Image: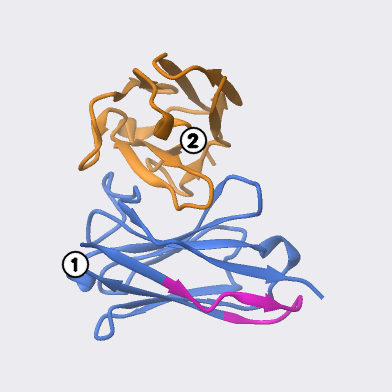
Chain colours: A blue, B orange
């Protein structure tokens, strides 16, 4: 059974940093691209970032490019999202999700399995 | 960036009825790379359909999708209490991937 468990959320001041983790189990982690999607309170979904199975290819939304970094440790079956220079508008539940293939390409960029999310609140 | 507009915003229906949800794209979605997700309160979204009409693993045939280009539809038949939720479409044909704002299907 595929399981994705996010952690690392919390309250942080504007301009601060936070690192989210997503522990994966139930599948061969290194064979699948992964992604982060966020949802502001009471709002819709926004794609944030994605990474290929090997970690060699990464993708970012314009709203976070240059501030967020995505990475993975395939030996630990864990996905990360390093968030710097946080803003109030980054406040959201952050979900990690598994994609159907090794790369996000050729129609394989939909989200097959989702974690339960971790809440990030940016406020002074 | 492709903007997805879902309609209606809210659909009020009774159990047993059917529902038709629309997702319209601001430009053509490449190869009909469109997915639908269901989200219940306090839960993560769940993949229902991909490629506009292919059901994900374990999704019953009461959920069906159609459409191409810029106009897509999610059809739900014989609504049951567990089907009342928010439904999102997502295009993954071109970066950045984008989601619609959601359609809430509520009990009338």
First to last magenta residue range: A6-18
Q: Which mark is residue A27?
A: 1
In this rendering, is residue A30 above or below A48? below
In this rendering, is residue B30 above or below B20? below
Residue B35 placement: quadrant: top left
* Residue A10 within the segment the image draws in magenta: yes
Where does label 2 land, which residue?
B85
Residue B7 location in percent, x, y?
A: 56, 22
Q: Is residue B84 left or right of residue B61?
A: right
User: What residue is shown at x 32% (from left), y 29% (from top)?
Assistant: B52
Residue B32 location in percent, x, y?
A: 33, 30
In front of the other: label 1 or label 2? 2
Question: In what quadrant of the picture does the N terminus of chain B appear?
Answer: top right
Of all chains, the one bearing label 2 is B
Residue A41 location in percent, x, y?
A: 66, 53
Residue A50 placement: quadrant: bottom left
Looking at the image, how many numbered discs can be counted on the residues? 2
In this rendering, is residue B104 above or below A34? above
Q: Is residue B72 left or right of residue A98?
A: right
Q: Is residue A37 left or right of residue A108?
A: right
In this rendering, is residue A2 above or below B86? below
Q: Mark 1 and mark 2: span between their CA atoms?
A: 28 Å
């Amino acid at each position: 059974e595929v399981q994705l468990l996010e952690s690392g959320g919390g309250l942080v001041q504007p301009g601060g940093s936070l690192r989210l983790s997503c522990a994966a189990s139930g599948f061969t982690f290194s064979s699948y691209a992964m992604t982060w999607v966020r949802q502001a309170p009471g709002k819709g979904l926004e794609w944030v970032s994605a990474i290929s199975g090997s970690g060699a290819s990464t993708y970012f939304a314009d709203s976070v490019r240059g501030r967020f970094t995505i990475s993975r440790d395939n030996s630990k079956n864990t996905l990360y999202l390093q968030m710097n220079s946080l803003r109030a508008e980054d406040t959201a539940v952050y979900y990690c999700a598994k994609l159907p293939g090794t790369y996000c390409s050729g129609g394989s960029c939909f989200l097959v399995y989702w974690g339960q999310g971790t809440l990030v609140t940016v406020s002074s | 960036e492709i903007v997805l507009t879902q309609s209606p915003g809210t659909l009020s229906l009774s159990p047993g009825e059917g529902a038709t949800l629309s997702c319209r794209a601001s430009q053509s979605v490449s190869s009909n790379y469109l997915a639908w997700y269901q989200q219940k309160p306090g839960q993560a979204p769940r993949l229902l359909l991909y490629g506009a009409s292919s059901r994900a693993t374990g999704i019953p045939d009461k959920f069906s999708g159609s459409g191409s280009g810029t106009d897509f539809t999610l059809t739900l038949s014989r609504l049951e209490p567990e089907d009342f939720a928010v439904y999102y479409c997502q295009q993954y044909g071109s970066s950045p991937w984008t989601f619609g704002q959601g359609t809430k299907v509520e009990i009338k």
